[in-house]
Amino acid sequence: MYTVYAIQSLQHNYIYVWLTNDLERRLSQHNWWKEQTTRPYAPFELIFTEIFKTRPSARLREKYLKSGVWKEFLKKIGK
């Protein structure tokens, strides 16, 4: 199973969307400054998740969520 997730920085105006097969591990990495891309924006809160059976289907959804329209939606639900 794969999870597409969105996290929002608690201190900055930053939303990160990605996919993983271990959500708890990834959230820990983001919040404990282990992930180079998100390190400057930690700590984070989880604002959105969706579960998929296959990685290709999760990847398609991740790409869609990164589109401009969905980023605006995620900003609204994150506040």
Image (cartoon, rainbow, N blue to C red):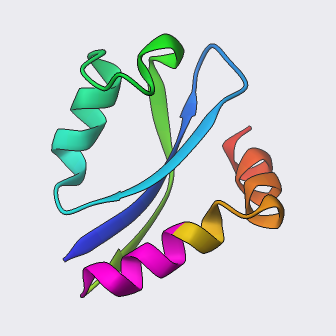
Residue 20 rendering spot, x and y as whole percentages? 26, 58
Query: 68 left or right of 18?
Result: right
Where does the magenta region start and end? 54-62
- The number of callouts visible is 0
Q: In this image, 57 relative to 55: left or right?
A: right
From the viewer's perspective, is 26 left or right of 70? left
Between 51 and 71, the one nearer to me in the picture: 71
Residue found at x 48% / y 34%: 45
**Residue at 30 percent of width and 15 percent of height:** 33
Q: Position of residue 72 (x, y in %)?
A: 82, 54
Residue 66 vs residue 74, the one in the foreground:
66
On screen, residue 41 above or below 14: above
Dividing the picture into quadrants, the one containing residue 43 is: top left
Q: Is residue 5 above or below residue 16?
A: below
Q: Position of residue 39 (x, y in %)?
A: 41, 16
Q: Residue at x 51, y 68 (%)?
A: 62
Would you say the magenta stretch is mainly helix, strand or loop? helix
Please identify the quadrant where the C terminus is shown.
top right
Quarter of the image holding residue 27? top left
Residue shown at 67%/17% (left/top)? 12
Residue 40 percent across, percent down from the top left: 50, 12
Position above or below: 70 against 76: below
Answer with left or right where residue 56 lies relative to residue 75. left
Quadrant assignment, res 10? top right
- Does the magenta-highlighted stretch encompass residue 26? no
Q: Pick the quarter of the image with the N terminus.
A: bottom left
